[in-house]
Image (cartoon, helix red, strand yellow):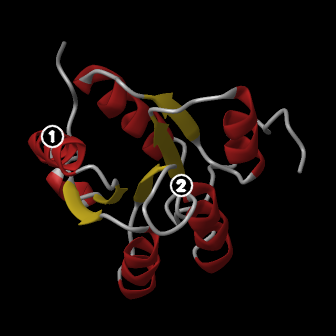
Amino acid sequence: MSVATPSASQGLVQILLLEDEVHVATALQMVLREAGYQVAWAATGQRALELLAQTSFDLLLADLYLPDMDGLEVVRQARVQHPPVPVIVITGYSSLATALAALRLGTADYLEKPFTEEEITACIQRVLAGRGKDGGPRDNMPTPLLKY
């Protein structure tokens, strides 16, 4: 399956990867860079929040189980501090409760580990395609079914 990469005219898409497992983070960074994305990595929630405060990211890819704080708390703080940044939650410990909590926080998508290279890159493309030029949702995007 061929994966379209970000075009040079659009500039490089910057993704913040929040993942505490080194082998998972290394593999994801390799896949995302091969797909044409710039990737910054944070192994803790606190580091991710620091990076979000310092750099303008196009996407946050966030694991839920972290050594220093709950990933949903990182998402909650990111939504307050940087509302236009879309968030994709990735987790190896999925449950209906965490999926609903993530959706209530306004995450763009929720992926269960393990996932394939094609699944993660397609998810990222889908989420980024739903953004307008200012980083917010496009006017023609459907309204979410869940109201918060």
Residue 27 shows which numbered tag?
A: 1
Q: Which residue is drawn at 48% across and 31% down?
A: 111
Residue 86 shows which numbered tag?
A: 2
Name the image quarter holding residue 132: bottom right
Residue 105 place in picture, x, y as percent: 72, 54
Q: Residue extending furthest front? A: 67
Q: Residue extending furthest bottom? A: 54
Q: What secondary structure is marked by label 1?
A: helix
Real-space CA distance between mark 1 and mark 2, rounded to the nearest whole angstrom: 22 Å
Q: Residues within 10 Å of mark 1 (few under 14, many from 20)?
A: few
Label 2 is placed on what type of residue? Pro
Residue 10 shows which numbered tag?
A: none
Query: Does residue 80 appear to the left or right of 143 in the view shown?
Result: left
Name the image quarter holding residue 121: top left
Residue 124 place in picture, x, y as percent: 39, 39
Q: How crowded is mark 2: few (under 14 residues within 10 Å), some or many (20 or more)?
A: many
Label 1 is placed on what type of residue? Ala
Q: Which residue is drawn at 22% across and 49% down?
A: 25
Query: Does residue 72 appear to the left or right of 34 in the view shown?
Result: right
Contact (CB < 8 A) between labels 1 and 2? no
Q: What secondary structure is marked by label 2?
A: loop
Where the N terminus falls, by quadrant?
A: top left
Disc 1 vs disc 2: which is toward the camera? 1
User: Image height check: is 122 above or below 20?
Assistant: above
Query: Does residue 119 appear to the left or right of 52 in the view shown?
Result: left
Mark 1 or 2 closer to N-term?
1
Q: Which of 115 and 86 is in front in this view?
A: 115
